[in-house]
Image (tube, rainbow, N blue to C red):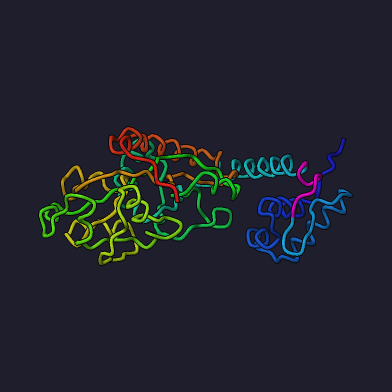
Amino acid sequence: MARRLPPLNAAKAFEAAARHLSFTRAADELAVTQTAVSHQVRALEDWLGVALFHRGNRRITLTEAGQAYLPGLRDGLDRIAASTAAVADRTRQGPVHISALQSLTSRWLLPRLPDFHAQHPALDVLLSAGDRPVDLYREDFHLALRFTTRDRVEAQGLVATHLMDEAIFPVCAPVLTEAEPPLRTPGDLRGHVLLHDKVDDTPEDPGWAVWCRAAGIARPASPARHYSDAGLVLQAATAGQGVALARLSLVREDLESARLVRPFGPVTRTRYSYYAVTTPAMAPQPRVRTMVDWLVEQARDQADDPLLAEAVPPPEG
């Protein structure tokens, strides 16, 4: 018996629009116009003989039929994509292409890569370091390492594998602890330069503001120095240029070597964690599974770190 299948482009347009609840965002994802998405969805509704969306002036919502249709259709498209990727992967050679933050790449991932190559000598890795969030559906990446929440990742229809939680605390060069004024309590920050990376103290990653609330102090009106990357902030701190708010994953070696010290606590957990993120189509590929499994293994030592164990939850607000 012949299968009765919907037009594939129309099915893709509906699934993207239903996932985003927006024809505009679906059009951006599919690299077509909003009008094209609307026409494709209308064609699918005509083919099915049922409305899939309630169309308001500024928003769309799924009808009961649309809600019933979406899970099975999405599963079918994911299976098609996964099967296609699996077949293509058998014949395609090349490295695992990973996007990651510059700071995480230089301070956490790169020092560990020799272990990966020793375990998997036939599998190469291409690292793209930067702060721009890449579009895994449209750009040539197998995997991205993101500092985010699971809900945010899964809302984009992506697959998230938790790597490690994170904690923040002040660090400085040893010489600053005996400077004038000395750094002995959180209140002593008033007399010192605070170092920030470009996302610090924004609504997305409020950094110093969160830590000061956890420490029970008002955020000091101290001089500030701003840098484009958390790794640069730590370099500036090592040079004695101020006090940095460090992430545990990035600063462990500096603490062990005493290039940087913790003048006082508390250690505060962050709202975000690190995740390995990929698309449903890429997730089953052997090279991607191998890399994700290795990343999970590498991240386990962070879970056992005593500083993370003593970290307090981030304050509300």
In this rendering, would 132 be left or right of 239?
right
Q: Nearer the viewer, residue 81 or 174?
A: 174
Which residue is outermost to the right? 49
Q: Nearer the viewer, residue 221 or 54?
A: 221
Give x and y (percent) for residue 180: 11, 60
Where on the picture, by quarter, is residue 235? Answer: bottom left
- Residue in the image at 60% along x and 47% along y: 157
- Residue in the image at 75% along x and 66% along y: 35
Give x and y (percent) for residue 19: 67, 50
Magenta stretch: includes residue 146: no
Which residue is outermost to the top? 304
Q: Nearer the viewer, residue 231 or 31?
A: 231
Instruction: Classify the position of the N terminus by image quarter.
Output: top right
Q: Is residue 95 visible?
A: no
Q: Which residues are magenta?
A: 61-68
Magenta stretch: includes residue 65: yes
Above or below, comparing residue 228 to residue 155 in the picture: below
Q: Is residue 24 visible?
A: yes
Q: Main secondary structure of the magenta part?
A: helix
Number of residue marks: 0
Give x and y (percent) for residue 283: 55, 41
In this rendering, would 73 be left or right of 191?
right
In this rendering, would 260 be left or right of 197?
left
